[in-house]
Structure formats: structure tokens, C-alpha cells
Image (spheres, rainbow, N blue to C red):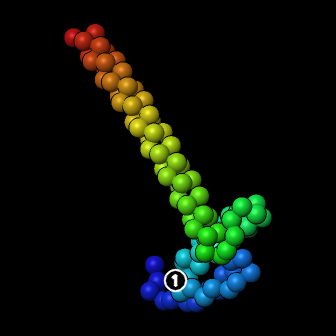
Amino acid sequence: MSNEQLTTTVNILDKDYRISCTPEEQEALSSAARYLDSKMREIRSSGKVIGLERIAVMAALNIAHDMLIANREANALKEDTQRHIQILVERLDDALHEHNQLEL
């Protein structure tokens, strides 16, 4: 990973923001900015929230909420997978033990 910093301009709600990042982070930053812009436009077009700051806060809350739910679901899936792996390991151990007993 490079220590070189470059300045990238992103556009959110028709306003440009100059942000420093490494070349490796540039595409992810642009993608995040497009995603944020999309969410902020959705909120603005609903007409329920007025003002750039309020729109930004609502978008941040929505994105944070979505991220927390996704993390919770990923953790639950990981735990479920670990349980299944443990069951398979136990079954394999039992089968190997049974096989060893038959050889004796």
C-alpha cells in the first residue's frame, strides 16, 4: 500500500468536495461518494427533510443502520456456519473412531 496521497474530487448533491486518499483507496472513495449522493438524493426527493445538514445526518443514520443490520446478519451467518462445521467435525471424529474400532 502506498503512502502517496492524491486529491480526489467527489460530487455530493451537486457540490464538489476535495478529499485526500491513496491511489488504492480512490475507487472505493468514489464509490462511497456515489452511494452517499444517491441516498441523500432519495431523502431530499421525499420532501420530508429540508436542509443539507439534516439530509446528510439522515443519510448517515440510514447508512449506519443498514451497516449494523448487515453486520448482525453476517455474524449470525458466521455463527451458524461455525456450528455446522463443529457438527461435521464431531461426525467425522465419530466415524473415524468407529472405523478405528472396527480395525482392532
In this rendering, the answer to whether 102 lies above or below 41 is above
Does residue 14 appear left or right of residue 60 in this picture? right
Quarter-wise, where is residue 10 in the image? bottom right
Residue 76 locus on image (x, y percent): 45, 39
Q: In this orientation, which residue lies closer to the viewer: 99 or 49?
A: 49
Asked if residue 31 is positioned above or below residue 81 in the image, the reply reads below
Percent x, y for residue 36?
Answer: 64, 68
Residue 51 visible from this viewpoint? yes
How many discs mark residues in the rendered view? 1
Q: Residue at x 39, y 26 (%)?
A: 88
Amino acid type indicated by mark 1: Thr
Q: Is residue 92 visible?
A: no
Quarter that holds the C terminus: top left
- Helix, strand or loop for disc 1: loop
Of all residues shown, which one is farthest toward the left?
104
Q: Position of residue 3 (x, y in %)?
A: 44, 86
Q: Residue 4 at what x, y percent from top left?
A: 48, 89
The answer to which quarter of the image holds residue 45 is: bottom right
Instruction: Name the residue nearer the viewer: 103 or 15.
Output: 15
Q: Is 90 situated above or below 20?
A: above
**Disc 1: which residue:** 22
Q: Which residue is nearer to you in this view: 65 or 95?
A: 65
Q: Tell whether 83 sits left or right of 61.
A: left
The quadrant where residue 59 appears? bottom right
Label 1 neighbour load within 10 Å: few <14, some 14-19, many 20+? some
What residue appears at the point 61 percent right and 70 percent down from the top-left corner?
A: 54
